[in-house]
Structures are given as C-alpha cells and as structure tokens.
Amino acid sequence: MARPKKNPQQKAYDSFRSLGMDEQAAREFLAKSLNIPVEELQVVEIRDQEAKMRGRRPKAAAGPTTYERQDALQKSILSMKDDLESAGFGFLLRIPGPVQPIAKEISDPKTGGFIAHVEESLGAYIQRVSIQGNFAQRQPFDHMHKDKIYRRLIRDFIREAAMPEAKIAALSDGSNGGRASSLQDPGLRYSVIDGLQRLYCYCIAILLVFRRSNLITDRCITAEAWEYVKEAVEASGDVKEATARILSRPVRYEIFWQIDLEGLLHYMVTFNTGQRRMSLEVQLEIMEGPLIKELEVGVKIPIYEDRHSLPGQQKPKAQFAASDLVMATRAFIESNPQIKKPDEAESLLEREDGYLESSFDVGDIKDVVYALKRITVDIHQKIMDRYAGDPANKYILSGGGTFLLSFAAACGKVRNSLNMTALKAALERFTEQLDRPADDPLNLEAYQRVLRNITTSRGKATRRLVYETFLRFFNGTTTVLDWADTALQIGL
C-alpha cells in the first residue's frame, strides 16, 4: 500500500518537530501561524503515522485556551504565598510593618496628599501590595505568550535587571473617604496606581524561578514561553537559592497617602494615559465603588465587575454589569434614559465637589437601593422564570444596559414627579402584570418587532421607546406594555 501524501499542515508540523520543538510547542506555534485553534489542526505525531494508515486518525489533544492558561496562572499567583511558605520561604514573606520612606515626602496641592519613596524586599512588596486586591486598573493579559515586551521584561528581571518604580496608594478603610492621615495608621490597604502589570511580572518571575518547567505541566504557560526564559531561569542556579535571592531583591516604589478615592482615580487616569486604556466601565466601577458594594453586599444584587475579569471571560447572563448599575442609578435619579457612559465618566471627573461622597445624597441612596432591588432581584427573577424557554427575552434586564437604564429612568420619573409611594404602587402593578397567565405577559415579542423597525439612532430610539412605554403603563394610559402604540405615538 502506498503511503498517503502529507497535508501541508502535517509537513510543517513534522519540520518543527525535526528541529527539536516538543509536541505541544509545535502544535501551538503552527496553530498561531495559521491563525486557527489548536484543536482544528490536522496533524499527528510521526509515531502515529502507521496507525493513521490502518484506521481513524487519533484526535490531537487540545492544549489549554488562552483563558484557561490565564486562569491557571492567576490561581498559581494567588496561591504562591502558601506554596512558598510550604517550601520553607516563610521567613522572606513576613507581613511587613508600616511603610518607611527613604526620603522626605512632598505635598500635592491637587489632591491634598503626600508622596514619598520606599525601598523594601520583593517578598515584602508582594505581601503589602496584594495581587488579589489589585485586579482593578485594567484586565490582566497574557504576559508570557501574547506580549513580547512584558515577556522580555520578566526574563530581564530574572537576570537581575532593575525594575522602574511603581506608584502605590495607602488608603484607610475608615470613614474619612479612604484618606490615610499617616503611613503609621493601623489597617491600611495598598492600591496600585501605576504598576499593576509590573506586579504581575514580579509574581510570574518568582513562579518561573520557583516552579520552572512545572508551569507547563500545570497549564500556566506554553512550552514556547518556557523556552524563551529557560536559559535565564536555569542560569539563576539552584531552585532554593535562586528563589530566596529573588524574594530578597530590593524594589523601590512611590507611596501616595492622605488621598481619598477621588485622588486615587485622579492618579490612575493621570499616570496611565499613555498605556493600555482604562475602560469606561472600570472607571465607573472605581468611582462608584461604595455604591456598588452597597448594592452587592447590602441588596444581594448579582453583580459582575469588568475590572475582575480575564480576557475571554464572559459575563454570566444572569448577572448585572457593575457599570450598568452605576448608569441605572444615575438614570433613576435624573429621570433620564439618554445618559451615556463617556458623559457620565467625564462629569464625575469634572465635578468640583467630589464624585464619590456627593454623587448621591442619603435620600437618593435609600430610594435607589429600593428601586434597584425590586428591579434587579425581584422583577429580574420573575422575568427569568416566566421567559425560561425564551433566551432572547429571559435576560432582557441583565443582558445589556439599554432596557435596564430606561426602566430605571421611568421609575425615577414617577418618584420625582410624585413620590416613592406612587413608585412602589407602580412596581406592584408591574409585578402583577408578570403574574398574568399569558405566555408573553410583557408583550416582549411585540417589543422585538418594534426594535427591528428602528433603522436610525437605534440606541437613542430604543431608550426612548422603553422609557415612554413604562411611563404610559405606570400612569395608567395603557393597561399593558403597549410597545407598538408607544412607537406610533412618539413617531418611531
């Protein structure tokens, strides 16, 4: 029997293997070159060629996806302290005491805070600036595989190159808006202003020196990435001595204190303007952190924060994006369905009297909490139950900000024009509508048909449609959510 001809993928794969590249690295390199997933490659190992001639080609084992690799690496970083202590490095990982500046501080009239310089060991630094508490500025990315600059920086740091100073904020959990009056205050927490990716690089460098090629087996890095740093890691010497040495390395950083969360965001935006952009969603999450915490902890709203997600990670459909809740809050207070994230972020930054403490007064917060709890907990669950077999409408509140924001704005209009008693009655009528025995109690099929007929300014028109339809239902103009009639009345 004649040997079958090799396909082009197989020829390229065999060439890579003949050059000494291991199986996993050859597959990933070929898939990357062809811009296709590894599992779609049509290649087999040379030792499997005869088996291929006799029967079905064995399916190639799929390597980890980018998300799976990132997730595994992140978990390894989070467990790194415990793993190092178990290996006998606990003496280099003691919880550091108060920060000791190495030079006199300077003041910043913009924020009313102070700035100084600090030097301490890397082991102390990664304890002080916890990676777990700093998934905030931007999503972490694939440092060892996708980004050549950071991969080179990690390799150079293992070779004992110096790292540029990071910028760290010392914040208080007290009632003074997060301001730490002194670096000696008890219970301070430390937030990365500029240097989150360097913190990642520090942690990855420690893991490489400590665990080495085991990171491939644990699906944290690729074989190709290991080959890039292998020489530098092995040149660092014995695992135990090299790990102790890297944990003892001195690092320097700037420390900022006596600033509140406003000042923290000011510095984050200022120092990161030339780098990977902080998304509007993350800015809103940071600026309204106290509100989000209250909604998540106090009200039990299922919240998903963009700043805690990994590349490729999708928001669970039943959860609400934190930034959408921030916008819904503003829409409720202002009775305005047309607010936009860029405008909201800009207005918060420009507000002279502060964009945290003065964003919402106490009365507003109480009403917001009640309205959002009814919408995102009670009503959301009822909609998911009633439309369980209809994916297009089941997550209509949590699936995107448009419907939620406009619904909240309509609720805010009732509250502002009348009072909270009237709003509570209106929401009760709405839940009664949901309890109707009809297959489509909210007439969402009609809503989807109206949307398909909107051809211009879709976002603005959709927000107006939802807002006006709810208002007409709340004030008794219609006895059901009459989307088609509303569209006719407002000229859509």
Image (tube, helix red, strand yellow):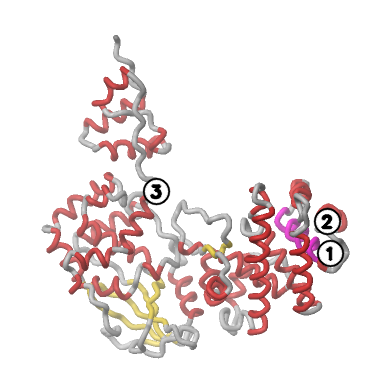
Asked if the residue at tag 2 contacts the one at tag 3, i.e. Cβ–Cβ closer than 8 Å, the answer is no
Work out how far the residue at label 1 is from the one at label 3, CA to CA, in angstroms. 48 Å
Q: Earlier in the sequence, mark 3 or mark 2?
A: 3
Q: Quadrant of residue 353?
A: bottom right
Q: Which mark is residue 472?
A: 1
Asked if the residue at tag 2 contacts the one at tag 1, i.e. Cβ–Cβ closer than 8 Å, the answer is yes
Q: Which mark is residue 363?
A: none
| Residue type pointed to by label 3 | Thr
Q: In this rendering, which labeled residue sits more in front, label 3 or label 2?
A: 2
Work out how far the residue at label 3 is from the one at label 2, CA to CA, in angstroms. 46 Å
| Residue type pointed to by label 1 | Arg
Q: Earlier in the sequence, mark 1 or mark 3?
A: 3
Badge 2 marks a residue whose secondary structure is loop
Q: Residues in magenta?
A: 458-471
Main SS type for the magenta part?
A: helix
- The answer to whether residue 380 is left or right of residue 81 is right
Can you see residue 455?
Answer: no
Can you see residue 317?
Answer: yes
Query: What residue is drawn where x is 30% and y is 83%?
Result: 99
Q: Tag 3: Cα neighbours inside 10 Å, few (<14), some, or many (≥20)?
A: many
